[in-house]
Amino acid sequence: MRRNGFLDSQKDSIQSRLEEASKARVQQVLGKVLYTGEAPKKLSEAELAKISTDLYREGMVYYGDTHAHPNSSFAYTTASLLELMSFDSCNEIELINKPLLLIVGDKADTAYMSEEAYKKASGTRDKELFKLKNATHIQTYYKHEVVLEALSKLEAFYGVKL
């Protein structure tokens, strides 16, 4: 997701972000560490309404308000973007030859990532993409009935597969 951006929203800026990260790496070697990102702030209802995706809107509430940790800065070294952009969770996923369970909210705008992983996991026939009912990505973290559904599925799946 770091390379292409959420919903491929940053594909046009891959090279410029890699260049920025490379320059930051040089600065880091010289003793100056540069950071990207900051902790989300509590937003007003009007500000939240302007955020078009559930992931970012609900994420701002979850990480910036209801579950904010006072020691979390959300910042990462700008130079580390080189590693973050080279990571691909689907890279070599076809090598998985054991039972595979992917769990995603049925209303998650991030579901496309799990669906892609499911399709690419060709090394196992024993795989399942399980969709939690009435759940967005962020709601899978805390919504009581969704968490219970996920735990029940995990117990059932691994109770048989392990």
Image: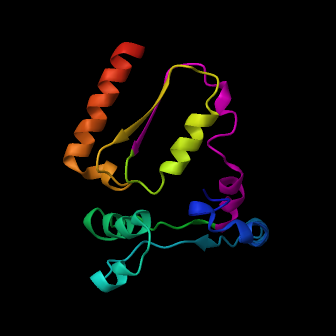
Quick one: quadrant of the N terminus? bottom right
Residue 156 position in % (x across, y down): 31, 22
Residue 157 position in % (x across, y down): 37, 22
Residue 30 position in % (x across, y down): 77, 70
When asked about the image quadrant of residue 48, the answer is bottom left
| Residue at image point 32% right, 51% down | 135
Q: Is residue 134 left or right of residue 16?
A: left
Quick one: quadrant of the C terminus? top left
Q: Does residue 162 appear in the picture of this structure? A: no
Magenta span has 82?
A: yes
| Residue at image point 38% right, 70% down | 57
Residue furthest out toward the left: 144
Q: Which residues are magenta?
A: 78-104
Residue 92 position in % (x across, y down): 69, 33
- Asked whether 122 or 138 is in front, the reply is 122
- Asked whether 75 or 119 is in front, the reply is 119
| Residue at image point 33% right, 16% down | 159
| Residue at image point 26% right, 30% down | 152
